[in-house]
Amino acid sequence: MKKVYYLKTCNTCLRILKDFNLSPDFELQDIKANPLTVKQVEELAALSGSYESLFSRRAKLYKEMGLKDQTLTEKDYKHYLLEHYTFLSRPVVVINDSIFIGNSKKTTESTKLALNEN
């Protein structure tokens, strides 16, 4: 599977995707227009090793809802990922059995290497 979960209104996501120069066989899913399903979140967590690894603590709602002052469990992370698209650390790139989460320089460089290999 070759898929990217991103936010069409996020300039960072758009800049990174343009930089990746993805092949036409990649499926793009705008998570605001087409929210993540339970199955998708479970598949992403299985690839990444946890729901927490998919969760963005930089989301505005994270602070607004007081989540930073709580101890969240894996069940909580899954719940919030399904509740609102903003909690997904973006973009998420899936290349076969590999997953790349977020927009850090290290992650984007690793993603580029993987893209060049496939």
Image (cartoon, rainbow, N blue to C red):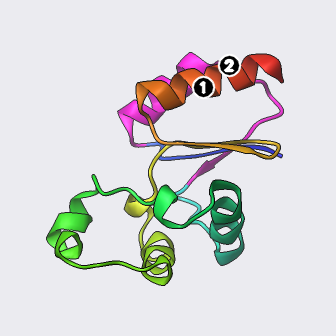
Q: CA distance from mark 2 to mark 1?
A: 5 Å
Tell me if 17 is positioned left or right of 87 in this view. Answer: right
The percent position of residue 110, horizontal first and vertical second, equals: 60, 26
Q: Is residue 21 magenta?
A: yes
Q: Which residue is mark 2?
A: 113
Quadrant holding the C terminus: top right
Residue toward you, 94 or 98:
98
The percent position of residue 3, horizontal first and vertical second, equals: 72, 44
* Rendered residue at 82%/43% (across/down): 96
* Rendered residue at 72%/25% (across/down): 114
Q: Which residue is mark 1?
A: 110
Tell me if 66 is positioned left or right of 55 in this view. Answer: left
* Rendered residue at 25%/66% (across/down): 62
Q: Is residue 64 visible?
A: yes
The percent position of residue 41, horizontal first and vertical second, equals: 62, 68
Tally of numbered tags: 2
Please say if the residues under marks 2 and 1 sit with CB atoms less than 8 Å apart: yes
* Rendered residue at 63%/20% (across/down): 112
- In this view, 2 is above or below 34: above
Q: Is residue 22 visible?
A: no
Residue toward you, 32 or 13:
13
Tell me if 62 is positioned left or right of 100 in this view. Answer: left
For numbered disc 2, what is the local secondary structure? Answer: helix
Magenta range = 9-30
For numbered disc 1, what is the local secondary structure? Answer: helix
Residue type marked 2: Leu
